[in-house]
Amino acid sequence: MTRIGVVTFPGTLDDRDAARAVRLAGAEPVALWHADADLRGVDAVVLPGGFSYGDYLRAGAISRFAPVMGEVVEAAGKGMPVLGICNGFQVLTEAHLLPGSMIKNDHLHFVCREQVLAVESTETAWTGEYQPGERITIPLKNQDGQYVADERTLDELEGEGRVVFRYEDTNPNGSRRGIAGISNARGNVVGLMPHPEHAVEAGFGPDGARGPRSGTDGLRFFTSVMRALVS
Amino acid sequence: MPKPEILDPQGKAVAGALPRLGFGQFTAVRQGKRFELEVDGPVTPEVLAAAAEAATQVLSNPVIEDVVRVADSEADAAATISSGNLA
């Protein structure tokens, strides 16, 4: 069975939901601890959301130096799929696995909403089961969600097809070019601000076509990586 | 400090509040961070160099922030290292 690690840092909030999403997708979640330089033989890693180290210094800045992150960076370099969600995305940028950074939302408010995204790349380990251009709805909840990078980096990301998700209908935080998620060049490392792990089970997700809270658009992140690992 | 080209939402919010409190002469505000590091013993050039290294590698994120000053705060005319010399 595919084993997917979920890292817990001090201040991580969404590790249980991420593990639950992994299980609902049909894989085995494996709890990974920030202080252990050990990935326990997992096939992929999820860095979940929250406020690791209270976002002190900068979001994700201290977590980057956790013992487990050395292992994650090394494994990512060898092609292991890594998904950073919200605070996990911030950790990936601080660890230089993904370019750019996140700063405070342009309107200064905490955002919590059901967000429509366009899936712009299905070439990554985490998006293979989506259709190019597909619109999906998953929750967005953050304070420091404004994606920024210099113009050259943004041009490079767009030119190489590494903008994986873009905000649709509205730009909720002032992110450059409406970018919600990106990947590395190889496509095994993906980071995004919205939360796929909160939209994996009917009854607990965003409102969907089949009724209130029926949305499960996030589930295919996890089935995508299972397929990518098999092929 | 946030890089000049990076939007500083906190500074903008402060800039919006100042005129309401009667400080109408300020046209813009940018908000940064100041870290005070302590050592046992004197602040040698080596200590300052280590502080500069920590400033660029950990305390700031070069994607969004510039290190504008690393100095011995107790020596008034402290050696100032411009951010350009830190890389």
Image (cartoon, rainbow, N blue to C red):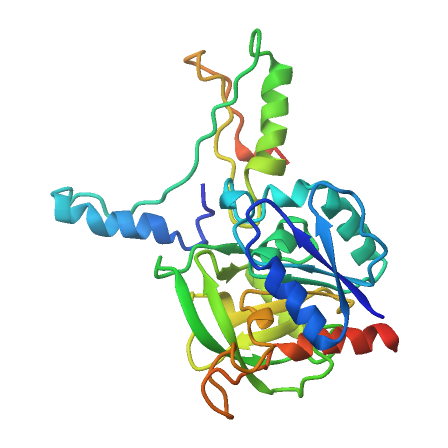
- x and y, in percent, of residue A226 in the image: 79, 74
Residue A90 in view here: yes
- x and y, in percent, of residue A90 in the image: 58, 55
Residue A172 in view here: no
Residue shown at 57% from the left, 52% from the top: A12
> Is residue A3 toward the left or the right of residue A195 in the image?
right
Q: Quadrant of residue A19?
A: bottom right
> Is residue B46 toward the left or the right of residue A37 in the image?
left
Q: Nearer the viewer, residue A110 or B40?
A: A110
Residue shown at 61% from the left, 31% from the top: B54
Q: Quadrant of residue A151?
A: bottom right
Q: Quadrant of residue A164?
A: bottom right
Outermost residue, right side: A231
Q: Nearer the viewer, residue B46 or B27?
A: B46
Outermost residue, left side: B22
Outermost residue, bottom side: A210
Q: Nearer the viewer, residue A89 or B48?
A: A89
Vertical order, B54 against A202 (above or below)? above
Quadrant including the C terminus of chain A: bottom right
Residue shown at 68% from the left, 53% from the top: A7
Q: Tally the marks.
A: 0
> Is residue B38 toward the left or the right of residue A185 in the image?
left
Quadrant including the N terminus of chain A: bottom right
